[in-house]
Image (tube, rainbow, N blue to C red):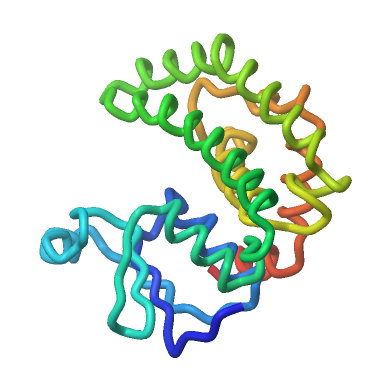
Amino acid sequence: MTSHSSIKLTYFGIPGRADAIRLTFAVGGVLFENHIVSESEWAALKPSMPFGQVPLLTVDGTTQFAQSTTILRFAGQVAGLYPTDDLVKAALIDQLVMHIYDMISIYSHARLAEDDAVVAAIHKRLAENTFPRMLRELDALIARHSGGTWAVGESITIADLFMFSFFKTIREGVRKGMPTTLFDESPHILKSMDAVATHPRVVEWFATH
């Protein structure tokens, strides 16, 4: 774990691409400033962002970097939830995270539609035709590399927190057209998600934020 005088995460007041990062810091017991940007602030703040986007991490008040997966890996290293001395385990974690990012990229196209019925129809097609195969592949990966509960190895990593953060809204029925039963045939995914949901520091984070 690396010590820094300050860590500040800037993002909107939604889960989005920052929740896995927030949970990583929380589970690792890393103090950080959870800087929430309002819509009224964003217009003025956007030009100062490295790529005109958030999340953004500011370290020690001077160094800033963007890109959510970059920030997630950094957070994992600081929190002790991403290996710095085991390249194979790090690659297995990255593989899982990027597979889920492929799912997010496919899913994100639905947001371009303004009509709720169109969004729900796109989600329904993904749930019926695309995501089942990708979930089978993901579940098989976890089965191969899990130590029993967590996605990679025998302890919680950023892979578990990233997977939990993206799939949580589907499982809770927030995504119109996506059935909450989508993960019923993915026992290893569910085991990891349930373990994250009941982790004391995750429970505490959601209770206080």
Quadrant location of the N terminus in the rendered image: bottom right
x then y, percent, for residue 120: 44, 19
Specify the quadrant of the image occupied by residue 25: bottom right
Viewer-side residue, 24 vs 60: 60
Q: Nearer the viewer, residue 17 or 42?
A: 17
What is the total number of numbered labels drawn onto the structure image?
A: 0
Q: Position of residue 138 (x, y in %)?
A: 67, 30
Rendered position, 57 above or below 123: below
| Residue 15 versus residue 31 in the image, above or below | above
The residue sitting at 54% across, 55% down in the picture is 20
Task: Identify the residue at image location x=41%, y=53%.
Answer: 68
Horizontal arrangement in the rendering, residue 107 relative to residue 61 (left or right):
right
Write the residue at 74% across / 47% down: 152
Of all residues, the one furthest to the bottom in this rendering is 5
Question: Taking 60 as reference, is 177 above or below it?
Answer: above
Q: Nearer the viewer, residue 42 or 92?
A: 92
Q: Position of residue 84 (x, y in %)?
A: 62, 65
